[in-house]
């Protein structure tokens, strides 16, 4: 796993992606990604006791945890998945029917991760030799489910000469839904702007602008994103998490 060695966090600060929920009877399962939860135990009592459900958690088909949850309680496994017992079939005093008839509504939520979208904007699609410089605005947004930390942005102009603007930007953090401010000295939220010199070429030439973004999530897991702009429209080449 590629980790930021300075990472330290509290479980309460973790952010979770949109999950799924399902009513489970005895022996039934719900899955999310490579995780599966099985309801394997319901208590049977004539006394007014707190009801609970026993669950088994599997990762890639291998049992990794065995837990009991009361209504409203959640369980977090190695900061990757959160399991919550949302609701039970009856009140404790009435929970005397057969275990097979009882149910618990279980919710699974995977850990949220940062992701990025880049919008490229130029004043036109084609430029002639010796024309005015190309101005490119880049709007970079965290479209993921979690805050990004230690964000490094590297812009490769693809052979064009940069005559204005910076090709490297760093932000300490970028909350989900937020955009990168290209000019932190102004109160407005500005795009990242580059001015590129138009080369003196005769034949038609296509230039690619590549944006590489590296960041960490709150756990210290590293992510890398690479996006390519080829006139006239951008295209997402890859979105990848460093192997764990």
Image (spheres, rainbow, N blue to C red):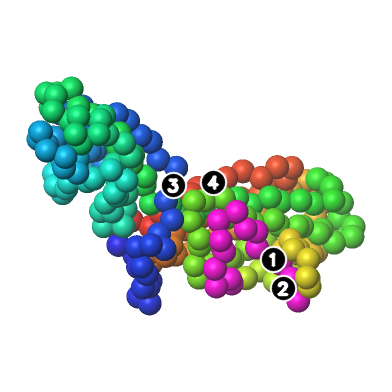
Q: Report the residue at 26% width, 51% height from top.
A: 75
**For mark 4, does the 10 Å Cα neighbourhood hold few (<14), some (14 to 19), or many (20 or more) residues?**
few
Mark 1 and mark 2 in contact? Answer it, CB < 8 Å: yes
CA distance separating discs 4 and 3 = 23 Å
Q: Position of residue 3 (x, y in %)?
A: 35, 68
Q: Identify residue for label 2.
A: 184
Do the numbered discs 4 and 3 sit on residues whose CB atoms are within 8 Å? no
Q: Is residue 151 visible?
A: yes
Residue located 38% across and 51% down the image? 111
> Could you tell me if the residues under marks 3 and 2 are in contact, i.e. CB atoms within 8 Å?
no
Q: Which mark is residue 17?
A: 3
Say which quarter of the image contains residue 9. Answer: bottom left
Q: Which residues are magenta?
A: 170-185
Task: Give the mark, 4 or 2, whose residue is nearer the N terminus.
Answer: 2
> Which residue is painted at 37% across and 73% down in the image?
7
Dot 3 or dot 2, earlier in sequence: 3
Q: CA distance from mark 1 to mark 2?
A: 6 Å
Q: Nearer the viewer, mark 4 or mark 2?
A: 2
Q: Nearer the viewer, residue 147 or 13?
A: 13
* SS assignment at label 1: loop
Residue 30: within the magenta?
Answer: no
Spot the residue most to the left. 45
Secondary structure under badge 4?
A: strand
Where residue 237 is drawn, which disc sits there?
4
> What crowding class fits label 2: few (fewer than 14 Cα within 10 Å), some (14-19), or many (20 or more)?
few
Between discs 1 and 3, the one toward the N terminus: 3
Magenta span: chief secondary structure:
loop
Q: Earlier in the sequence, mark 1 or mark 4?
A: 1
Tell me: 53 left or right of 19.
Answer: left
């Amino acid at each position: 796993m590629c980790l930021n060695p300075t990472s330290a966090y509290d479980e309460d600060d973790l952010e979770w992606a949109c999950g799924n929920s399902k009513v489970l009877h005895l022996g039934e399962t719900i899955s999310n990604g490579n995780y599966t939860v099985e309801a394997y135990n319901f208590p049977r009592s004539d006394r007014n006791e707190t009801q609970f459900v026993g669950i088994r958690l599997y990762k890639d088909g291998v049992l990794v945890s065995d837990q009991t949850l009361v209504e409203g309680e959640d369980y977090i496994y190695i900061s990757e998945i959160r399991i919550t017992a949302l609701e039970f079939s009856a009140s404790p005093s009435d929970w005397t029917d057969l275990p097979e008839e009882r149910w618990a509504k279980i919710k699974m939520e995977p850990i949220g991760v940062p992701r990025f979208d880049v919008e490229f904007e130029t004043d036109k699609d084609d430029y002639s030799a010796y024309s005015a410089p190309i101005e490119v605005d880049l709007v970079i947004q965290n479209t993921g489910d979690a805050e990004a930390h230690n964000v490094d942005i590297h812009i490769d102009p693809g052979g064009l000469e940069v005559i204005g603007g910076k090709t490297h930007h760093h932000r300490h953090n970028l909350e989900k839904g937020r955009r990168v401010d290209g000019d932190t000295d102004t109160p407005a939220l500005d795009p990242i702007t580059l001015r590129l010199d138009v080369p003196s070429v005769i034949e038609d030439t296509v230039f690619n602008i590549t944006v590489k973004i590296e960041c960490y999530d709150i756990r210290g897991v590293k992510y890398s994103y690479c996006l390519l702009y080829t006139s006239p429209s951008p295209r997402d080449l890859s979105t990848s998490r460093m192997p764990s």
